[in-house]
Image (spheres, grey):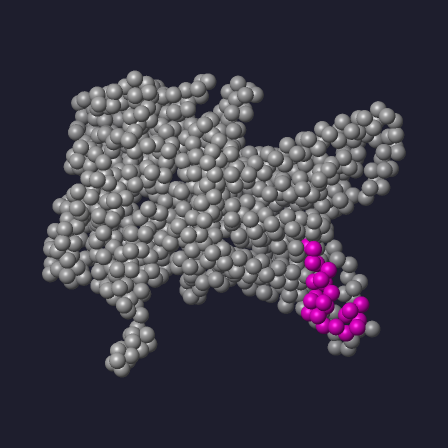
């Protein structure tokens, strides 16, 4: 009894408390799972306190960047595969420490995840492994089957497979009242360019251009006809077939959930998790593969992901990696909310993601998401991805908001993107 | 008064008051809509056709703001905001009153130049100095601290300007007679000048309070630990990447607007008088 | 009789003591970062890699960048429209609410002042909804004129939507200033004018406007400075869109810094911002001195 008393005193006064600080994005459906992981980790390491700084997704990268620049207190952080390149360039992340995962080599660690997932989520660079994959999502198209039936379409047969079909089907799904659109056939986000570039990226890659690497992007700038065809396919939805009225609603995900649009293309498996907060019923929603071109490549929507990194400023990198491992050890909890984590085995050796759980909480996983995951298009991975995305969104904006012609807009985009890489 | 003149007056009165009421409603409409929407269900907030009154009343949203989100400690955010705002206002009053008094009542070398320098700080876009300011504040060890918030937010060139105007218009008689009685300058300031400036200071309070209370950019960069966050940060946290719980966010917005609205309603009489006394008359 | 030991200059030197706290804190927390920012304009820096000295490159780029030109022009026009709309409406409202015929003055003044204290993040959602094609404002305009511009997605209409919101937000503040000014005009002036047979307009132009000269100067100058630095409205509602049509200078400074991570370029833009307001202040000072 005395020894336990002394031990307790040592715990309180003697043993120094280590604090780990982790920067993450906030999502009301996932935050509780993260808290659970934190508690589990603290229970295993009583002398460690973990502070997770939740940030709005839009501000996360900025705040992390500012903290790193001022050499503040940061042990680990979450980045998307699009954000990672710049941070890699600044040498801000530490390579994986296998011992923290209870493994002998980095390869043993990598084997615990789906093959190729490290690369897709941005956790690997030049053959070296830095991050812990946290989310792997791919975008698919979604359609409201109740709306389809309302206009006389059959969800079993009439779901569009090509871009031409898509424009036609979306056209039938537009609803107007007194000359004003009250339901879009299709819509995307009219404020945030990234969601539009995501779809445009898929279109361009389907047409044979490589928009996922700097070299490929620059090479594609010498093919104005293909660029124009790709841009036109997207912008015609606003200007020609008029299935998308941007002034009606500005947010694609909320719009679909509130039936302000019959289709949208920027939802991944996680959309099932948020659907219940909206008015549209689950039974009326059906994901389907991105439309293809009759003569184009068989590629689906963009695949992206998030990874967890340990900062080079961390004073306890081994503990930090252990914490990240714990954070990424609840794939079934996340899958239940629709977030897919590509983990096959936990560090303890047991199975990670349970296919049955995934199938139950992610409807159409086997029919749509999994097959598309094998054929995703990719977003640009470059330190200049933000200015490039701006130029691509500007090209779309000019056509749909200003009425500029597609060819003129493509010409401007070409000169802007070439200038970025000079 | 002739009868037709009286009738014209009454008609004009009715027209004037009706227009004023319509204008008042138009101006307060967004606030009303915000309150009503905080009591709707999430699916009704953005629904079409647009509804003004909640089809289903959702009182739960206000409860959820305080209980449903473990990482959002709203009482703490409110406390932080109140503490920071009160301190920043006190600092602003102190600086504005002393500097305003100093610039207006004393002729010393460099008076005009120094005042111009102080005034020139309104020409700085705050977004531009956020990063250098953060790096500097961090070098002082003040990052993630209340003082790091309070000091920069307590600086108001407009406040200095306003108090200088006021003290300029204040007759020197009281001050002179106190001087002749042998009182030192600081006592004169504290015991005579300052109390006379009460109403002007109150106007400054309201003006500066809404600036500090609603400030988002600086706290977002400076504050990293969750229990030091202020209200605007808390509200911004509701906007998830995939989903935004609107009723709860709007409820938080309503709660955050209340203190300022109440402050203003309470002091509105003094506010106008205070502004008048700063000598903006002519 | 003055107490012994007091000289005139010693008295005036107390002024230094009074202004010292302000000068010290302003220098340290505002002026020093501003000079740092100006210094930063000579570098290229993205916060996570090392700084790179580039001399005046940022300024050369800035003067040729069509996006900067667009932003500058947009800012000037937004500023001009907002200042005119705000001051005209504020003056009109002040006259209305100070009229002898007005009832519930305090209450109505409070309603008009309400937007000043509301956070834009909070009411931003409401405004966005009102400007959508099925929103309140679009419906109202359509019922009167038969059609409504696409306020937030048409590059020609969006700047006006910003002016509307900016006016709504600040009219109350300037109205209070005008009311304060009106309160100080002696009633006797008006009585004398009425005895002379002067009607409403005569009284307005001969008494009210001239008496408020200083008030006008203050409100117009401060509304120009505040609307030039306006950031929140465009950031929350349109993020500078559609197609950069509402990307005012403060927003461009923010985007170049925090979205494109070009802090050197962003600092160069802030120098431009500062210089513009400096030039404006000098012009305004000269005009005021000429008027005296």
Q: Please say whether residue B198 is one of the residues in the magenta stretch.
A: yes
Considering depth in this image, is A374 or B57 the residue closer to the camera?
Answer: B57
Q: Position of residue A25 (x, y in %)?
A: 33, 49
Quadrant where the N terminus of chain B sits is top right
Question: Residue B43's image quarter?
Answer: top left
Which residue is located at x 26 percent, y 64 percent?
Answer: A43
Question: Residue A326's image quarter?
Answer: bottom left
* Left or right of A17 on screen, residue B221: right
| Residue sitting at the far bottom | A2
* Left or right of A195 on screen, residue C273: right
Considering depth in this image, is A335 or A293 the residue closer to the camera?
Answer: A335
Examine the rendering and report whether any part of residue B169 can be seen. yes
Total marks drawn?
Answer: 0
Question: Residue A381's image quarter?
Answer: top left
* Left or right of A271 on screen, residue B16: right
* Left or right of A312 on screen, residue C226: right
The magenta segment is B177-200
Asked if residue C45 is positioned above or below residue A49 in the image, the reply reads above
Asked if residue C141 is positioned above or below residue A95 in the image, the reply reads above
Q: Position of residue A166 (x, y in %)?
A: 27, 22
Asked if residue A363 is positioned above or below residue B267 in the image, the reply reads above
Q: Please say whether residue B231 is one of the residues in the magenta stretch.
A: no
Which residue is located at x 26 percent, y 80 percent?
Answer: A1
Which residue is located at x 59 percent, y 48 percent?
Answer: B261
Considering depth in this image, is B167 or B242 the residue closer to the camera?
Answer: B242
């Amino acid at each position: 009894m005395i020894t336990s008393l002394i031990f307790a005193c040592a715990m309180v006064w003697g043993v120094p408390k280590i604090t780990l600080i982790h920067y993450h994005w906030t999502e009301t459906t996932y935050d509780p799972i993260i808290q659970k992981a934190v508690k589990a980790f603290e229970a295993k390491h009583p002398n460690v306190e973990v502070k997770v700084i939740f940030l709005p997704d839009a501000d996360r990268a900025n705040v992390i960047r500012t903290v790193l620049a001022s050499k503040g207190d940061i042990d680990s952080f979450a980045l998307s595969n699009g954000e990672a390149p710049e941070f890699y360039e600044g040498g801000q992340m530490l390579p994986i420490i296998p011992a923290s995962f209870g493994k002998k080599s980095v390869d043993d660690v990598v084997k615990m995840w789906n093959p190729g997932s490290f690369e897709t989520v941005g956790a690997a660079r030049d053959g070296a492994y830095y991050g812990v994959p946290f989310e792997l999502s791919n975008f698919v198209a979604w359609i409201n089957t109740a709306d389809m039936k309302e206009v006389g379409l059959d969800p079993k047969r009439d779901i569009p497979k090509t871009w031409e079909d898509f424009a036609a089907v979306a056209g039938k799904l537009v609803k107007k009242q007194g000359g004003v659109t009250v339901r879009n056939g299709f819509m995307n986000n009219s404020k945030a360019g990234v969601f539009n570039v995501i779809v445009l990226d898929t279109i361009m890659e389907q047409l044979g251009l490589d928009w996922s690497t700097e070299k490929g992007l620059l090479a594609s700038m010498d093919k104005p006809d293909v660029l124009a065809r790709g841009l036109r396919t997207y912008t015609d939805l606003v200007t020609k077939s008029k299935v998308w009225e941007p002034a009606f609603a500005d947010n694609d995900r909320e719009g679909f959930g509130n039936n302000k649009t019959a289709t949208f293309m920027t939802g991944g498996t996680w959309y099932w998790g948020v659907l219940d907060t909206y008015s549209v019923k689950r039974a009326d929603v059906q994901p389907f593969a991105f439309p293809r071109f009759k003569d184009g490549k068989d590629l689906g929507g963009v695949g992206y992901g998030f990874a967890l990194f340990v900062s080079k400023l961390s004073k306890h990198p081994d503990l930090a990696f252990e914490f990240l491992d714990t954070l990424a050890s609840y794939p079934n909890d996340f899958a239940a909310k629709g977030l897919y984590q590509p983990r096959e085995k936990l560090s303890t050796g047991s199975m990670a993601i349970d296919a049955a759980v995934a199938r139950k909480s992610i409807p159409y996983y086997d029919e749509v998401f999994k097959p598309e995951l094998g054929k995703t298009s990719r977003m640009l991975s470059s330190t200049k991805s933000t200015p490039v995305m701006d130029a691509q969104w500007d090209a779309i904006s000019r056509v749909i908001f200003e009425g500029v012609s597609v060819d003129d807009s493509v010409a401007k985009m070409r000169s802007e993107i070439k200038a970025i890489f000079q | 008064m002739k009868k037709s003149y009286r009738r014209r007056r009454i008609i004009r009165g009715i027209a004037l008051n009706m227009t004023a009421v319509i204008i008042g409603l138009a101006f307060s409409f967004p606030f009303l809509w915000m309150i009503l929407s905080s009591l709707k269900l999430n699916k009704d907030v953005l629904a079409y056709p647009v509804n003004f009154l909640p089809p289903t009343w959702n009182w739960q949203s206000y409860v959820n703001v305080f209980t449903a989100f473990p990482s959002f400690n709203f009482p703490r955010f409110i406390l932080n905001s109140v503490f920071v705002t009160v301190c920043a206002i006190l600092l602003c009053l102190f600086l504005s009153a002393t500097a305003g008094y100093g610039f207006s009542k004393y002729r010393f070398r460099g008076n005009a130049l120094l005042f111009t320098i102080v005034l020139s700080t309104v020409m700085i876009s705050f977004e531009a100095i956020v990063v250098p300011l953060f790096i500097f504040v961090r070098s002082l060890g003040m990052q993630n601290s209340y003082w790091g918030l309070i000091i920069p937010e307590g600086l108001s060139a407009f406040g200095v300007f306003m108090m200088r105007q006021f003290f300029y218009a204040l007759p020197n008689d009281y001050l002179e007679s106190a001087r002749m009685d042998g009182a030192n300058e600081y006592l004169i300031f504290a015991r005579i000048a300052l109390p006379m400036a009460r109403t002007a200071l109150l106007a400054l309070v309201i003006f500066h309070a809404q600036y500090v209370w609603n400030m988002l950019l600086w706290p977002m960069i400076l504050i990293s630990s969750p229990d030091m966050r202020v209200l605007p940060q808390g509200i911004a946290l509701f906007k998830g990447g995939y989903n935004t719980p609107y009723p709860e966010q709007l409820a938080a917005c309503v709660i955050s607007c209340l203190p300022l609205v109440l402050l203003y309603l309470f002091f509105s009489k003094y506010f106008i008088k205070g502004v008048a006394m700063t000598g903006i008359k002519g | 009789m003055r107490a012994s030991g007091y000289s005139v200059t010693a008295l005036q030197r107390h002024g230094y003591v009074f202004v010292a706290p302000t000068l010290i804190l302003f220098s340290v927390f505002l002026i020093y970062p501003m000079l740092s920012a100006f210094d930063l304009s000579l570098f290229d820096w993205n916060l996570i890699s090392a700084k790179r000295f580039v001399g005046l490159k940022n300024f050369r780029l800035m003067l040729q960048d069509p996006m900067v030109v667009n932003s500058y022009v947009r800012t000037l026009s937004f500023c001009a429209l907002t200042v005119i709309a705000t001051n005209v409406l504020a003056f009109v409202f002040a006259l209305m609410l100070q009229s002898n015929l007005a009832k519930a003055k305090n209450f109505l003044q409070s309603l008009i002042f309400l937007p000043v204290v509301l956070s834009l993040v909070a009411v931003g959602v409401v405004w966005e909804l009102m400007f959508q094609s099925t929103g309140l404002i679009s419906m109202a305009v359509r019922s009167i004129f038969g059609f409504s511009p696409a306020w937030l997605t048409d590059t020609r209409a969006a700047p006006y939507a910003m002016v509307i919101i900016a006016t709504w937000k600040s009219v109350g503040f300037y109205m209070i200033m005008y009311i304060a000014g009106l309160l100080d005009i002696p009633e006797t002036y008006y009585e004398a004018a009425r005895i002379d047979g002067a009607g409403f307009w005569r009284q307005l132009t001969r008494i009210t406007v001239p008496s408020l000269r200083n008030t006008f100067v203050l409100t117009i100058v401060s509304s120009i400075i505040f609307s030039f630095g306006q950031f929140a409205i465009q950031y929350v509602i349109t993020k500078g869109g559609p197609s950069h049509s509402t990307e005012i200078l403060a927003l461009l400074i923010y985007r170049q810094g925090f979205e494109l991570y070009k802090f050197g370029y962003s600092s160069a833009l802030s120098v431009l911002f500062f210089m513009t307001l400096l030039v404006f202040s000098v012009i305004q000072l000269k005009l005021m001195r000429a008027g005296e």
